Amino acid sequence: MTFVVTVGLAVVVLLTVAAPSLRRRGSRTMARIDAAAERLLPVLRHHRDRLAEQARTRVADRLEAQRRGTREEHRTVRVR
C-alpha cells in the first residue's frame, strides 16, 4: 500500500511539473489525461458534496442530541 501511494504521489508531482510543456507540444498522453479528468471531475465533485452534506447532517444531529441532553440534565437537577 505504501508503495502504491508513493508511486501515485510521484506521478502526480511529475505530471504537475511536466504538464505545461506536454500541453504546449500537443502530447496525446496529456490530452488523454485531460479528457479523463474532465469526465471524472463532475463525479468526484458530486461525491464530495454528498459526503459533505452527510457530515453536516451528522454534526447537526449530534449538536441537537447534546442540547437535548443538557436540557434533560438541568431538569433532573431541579427535581432533586
Image (cartoon, rainbow, N blue to C red):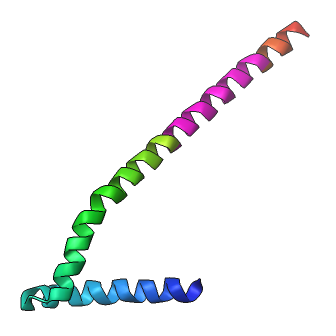
Prevalent SS, magenta region:
helix
Instruction: Give left or right: position of 48 versus 72.
Output: left
Counting from the top left corner in percent of width and height, residue 68 is at: 68, 21
Counting from the top left corner in percent of width and height, residue 63 is at: 61, 32
Most distant residue in the right direction: 80
Taking depth in this image into account, of 54 and 38 the one nearest to the observer is: 38
At x 27%, y 83%, the residue is: 16
Q: Is residue 46 above or below residue 71?
A: below
Tell me the quarter of the picture where residue 59 sits: top right
At x 59%, y 83%, the residue is: 1
Instruction: Give left or right: position of 2 versus 72.
Output: left
Q: Is residue 47 above or below residue 27?
A: above
Residue 70 painted magenta: yes
Q: Which residues are magenta?
A: 55-72
At x 33%, y 57%, the residue is: 43
Q: Is residue 39 above or below residue 74?
A: below
Counting from the top left corner in percent of width and height, residue 18 is at: 22, 90
Instruction: Give left or right: position of 49 versus 64.
Output: left
Q: Is residue 69 above or below residue 32?
A: above
Count numbered badges in the picture: 0
Taking depth in this image into account, of 63 and 80 the one nearest to the observer is: 63
Residue 80 painted magenta: no
Which quadrant of the figure contains the C terminus? top right
Instruction: Give left or right: position of 22 versus 60.
Output: left
At x 39%, y 48%, the residue is: 49
